[in-house]
């Protein structure tokens, strides 16, 4: 599939639409909302994992790669979802979690039971001394990255939760199993695949201490065989399908590696998710330390990745939101006085850059952070762990809540807000995670009735991409590089060119640009003239010259 004119919508299935009142989203619920997505204009839906899982990490702890978790429905329900989506011209992208499995997976159970074949599916080492793990690495969810298994007097590696054991990709059987799983879903009509933290699958070593006592990432990120393994996986599975569309989630990666992961001719993936631009509000690169976002750094990162990937003939996935990030509107915009304007402004930036835009459920109606005020409202394993860690470090509860309200992954995982009825129309039961209390004001029903809504604006952005090759394929060049509140860029293809202006702040911003010959293609404040000298608060504009 060519993916340059496509837009992907991400559904967090647990929170999208419940159809049977158990408080969990499900496949039958999703089917009832396909017309809504068709109306938005998207081409493909990425689903977070719906396969069998104990849900310690909400499905990223897979216990069976080939079965739908009964809480989401059945394989027949999935077949119907696939049929109904394709009928509407919408493709399906599945999430493949191949860096690790749940310890409830049959492979791990057989490993622990002593079957050598399966023991070699995972990564084991002797401890340094009784009770002391093989290395000092910290897991990404806090605590040591090794768990002791009495059965062998050895430890297994888990970069994430102790229930998520890392797979041993050096074992050719593991690699073949993963290819077989992709082919299983291909046989069910799935053309799209997102590969979870896939740049962590090949480790340089698991035997060295991290000199800084951190997570050891320099020993397993973009490892020695990762490109070879991805090429092999492609050749054995999705690479055989000319319609496939694939995206790899790349943790703490580099540009050079991404050029290989998603290069036009490298035979790996269609595109990559990278995260450098989403750390600009981390103080000292630490997720749990707050600082206002560094706008200069944000501009530079967005622009460097645009130009670097374009020079390398590689492809970016464009996004500010997903199920692991707080809501971008609350983070980079103003979700109170300028909720509409800033939601539209951020969307303009994402949708007009070079790459494939992703819309995370609810951003198209301007959903905000959850605003939880009690630890019992949080479900996410990372959030509940960090709550304990920060407490042990002596932070006050007040301070910790403040941090979680800004940073917790649950901010983005609250149920989709469909209308102003009980639980925002998500469920008739008790939702697994509380609905954000702003649902009476912020919901789909309101947005569909309002011609000037955020939803209507997203429709226009998606439409603009479809209608203009320059937006799909044009080269990117940053403008007004030194401006302290405006991000501006130009896209060019042949004789066509597009200028995009985005004011990231709640004050007016003066700009000096020669805009003669441009026509206004889209404005988030209803502006029609194109000779702009002052941008209003959070104003965004798309201007086209042909
Ligand atoms: C990815 C997923 C995240 C998950 C982690 C471990 O980052 O997006 O939700 O917790 O991998 O699988």
Image (cartoon, helix red, strand yellow):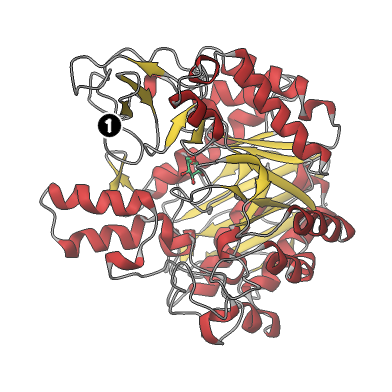
Image location of residue 339, percent across then percent down: 49, 73
- Decide: few, some or many residues near mark 1? Use Cα within 10 Å; few <14, some 14-19, many ≥20: many
Q: Image quarter for residue 463?
A: bottom right
Residue at left offset 55%, top offset 70%: 366
Name the element at disc 1: loop
As drawn, is 123 to the left or to the right of 118? left
Whether disc 1's CB lies below 8 Å from ligand 1 is answered: no
Q: Is residue 477 visible?
A: no
Which residue is farthest left? 394
As drawn, is 403 to the left or to the right of 69? left
Query: Considering depth in this image, is 505 or 4 the residue closer to the camera?
Result: 4
Residue at left offset 73%, top offset 24%: 234
- Count how many numbered circles sit on residues in the image: 1
Residue at left offset 75%, top offset 71%: 32
Residue 435, compared with residue 8, is above or below; it is below
As drawn, is 43 to the left or to the right of 11? right
Image location of residue 213, percent across then percent down: 23, 26
Per the image, the residue denoted by label 1 is: 144
Residue 296, compared with residue 540, is above or below; it is above
Which residue is farthest right? 87
Query: Considering depth in this image, is 208 or 454 the residue closer to the camera?
Result: 208
Residue at left offset 48%, top offset 63%: 329
Q: Is residue 82 visible?
A: yes
Image location of residue 140, percent across then percent down: 36, 37
Residue 116, compared with residue 451, is above or below; it is above
Q: Quadrant of the N terminus?
A: top right
Image location of residue 71, percent across then percent down: 60, 60
Query: Considering depth in this image, is 191 or 25 the residue closer to the camera?
Result: 25
Query: Considering depth in this image, is 479 or 9 the residue closer to the camera?
Result: 9
């Amino acid at each position: 599939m060519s993916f340059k004119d496509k837009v992907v919508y991400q559904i967090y299935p647990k929170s999208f639409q419940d159809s049977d009142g158990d408080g969990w989203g499900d496949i039958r619920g999703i089917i009832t909302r396909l017309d809504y997505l068709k109306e938005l204009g998207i081409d493909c839906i990425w689903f977070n994992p719906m396969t069998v899982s104990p849900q310690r990490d909400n499905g990223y702890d897979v216990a069976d790669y080939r079965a739908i978790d009964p809480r989401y429905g059945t394989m027949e329900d999935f077949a119907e979802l696939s049929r109904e989506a394709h009928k509407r011209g919408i493709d399906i992208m599945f999430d493949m979690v191949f860096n690790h499995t749940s310890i409830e997976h049959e492979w791990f159970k057989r490993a622990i039971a002593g079957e050598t074949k399966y023991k070699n599916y995972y990564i084991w080492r002797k401890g340094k001394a009784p009770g002391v793990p093989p290395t000092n690495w910290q897991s990404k969810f806090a605590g040591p990255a090794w768990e002791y298994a009495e059965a062998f007097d050895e430890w297994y590696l888990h970069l994430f939760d102790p229930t998520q054991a890392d797979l041993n990709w050096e074992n050719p059987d593991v690699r073949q199993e993963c290819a077989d799983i992709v082919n299983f879903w291909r046989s069910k009509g799935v053309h799209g695949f997102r590969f979870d933290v896939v740049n962590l699958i090949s480790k340089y070593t698991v035997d060295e201490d991290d000199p800084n006592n951190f997570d050891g990432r320099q020993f397993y990120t973009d490892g020695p065989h990762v490109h070879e393994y991805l090429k092999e996986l492609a050749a054995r599975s999705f690479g055989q399908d000319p319609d496939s569309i694939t995206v790899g989630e790349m943790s703490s990666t580099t540009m050079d590696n991404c050029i290989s992961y998603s290069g036009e001719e490298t035979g790996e993936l269609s595109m990559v998710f990278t995260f450098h631009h989403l750390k600009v509000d981390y103080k000292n690169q630490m997720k749990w330390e707050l600082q206002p976002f560094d706008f200069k750094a944000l501009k530079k990162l967005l622009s460097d990745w645009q130009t670097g990937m374009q020079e390398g003939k590689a492809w970016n996935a464009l996004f500010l939101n997903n199920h692991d990030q707080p809501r971008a509107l609350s983070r980079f915009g103003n979700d109170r006085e300028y909720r509409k304007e800033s939601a539209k402004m951020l969307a303009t930036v994402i949708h007009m850059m070079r790459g494939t835009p992703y819309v995370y459920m609810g951003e198209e109606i301007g959903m905000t952070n959850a605003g939880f005020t009690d630890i019992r409202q949080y479900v996410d394993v990372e959030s509940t762990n960090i709550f304990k860690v920060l407490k042990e470090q002596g932070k006050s509860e007040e301070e910790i809540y403040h941090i979680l309200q800004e940073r917790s992954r649950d901010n983005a995982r609250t149920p989709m807000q469909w209308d102003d009825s009980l639980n925002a129309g998500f469920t008739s039961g008790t939702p697994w995670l509380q609905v954000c209390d702003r649902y009476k004001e912020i919901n789909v029903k309101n947005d569909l009735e309002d011609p000037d809504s955020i939803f209507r604006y997203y429709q226009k952005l998606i439409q603009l991409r479809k209608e203009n090759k320059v937006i799909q394929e044009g080269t990117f060049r940053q403008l007004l590089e030194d401006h302290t509140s405006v991000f501006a860029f130009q896209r060019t293809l042949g004789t066509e060119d597009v200028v995009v202006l985005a004011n990231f702040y709640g004050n007016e911003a003066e700009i000096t640009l020669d805009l003669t010959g441009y026509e206004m293609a889209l404005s988030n404040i209803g502006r029609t003239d194109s000779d702009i000298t002052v941008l209003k608060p959070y104003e965004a504009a798309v201007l086209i010259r042909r």
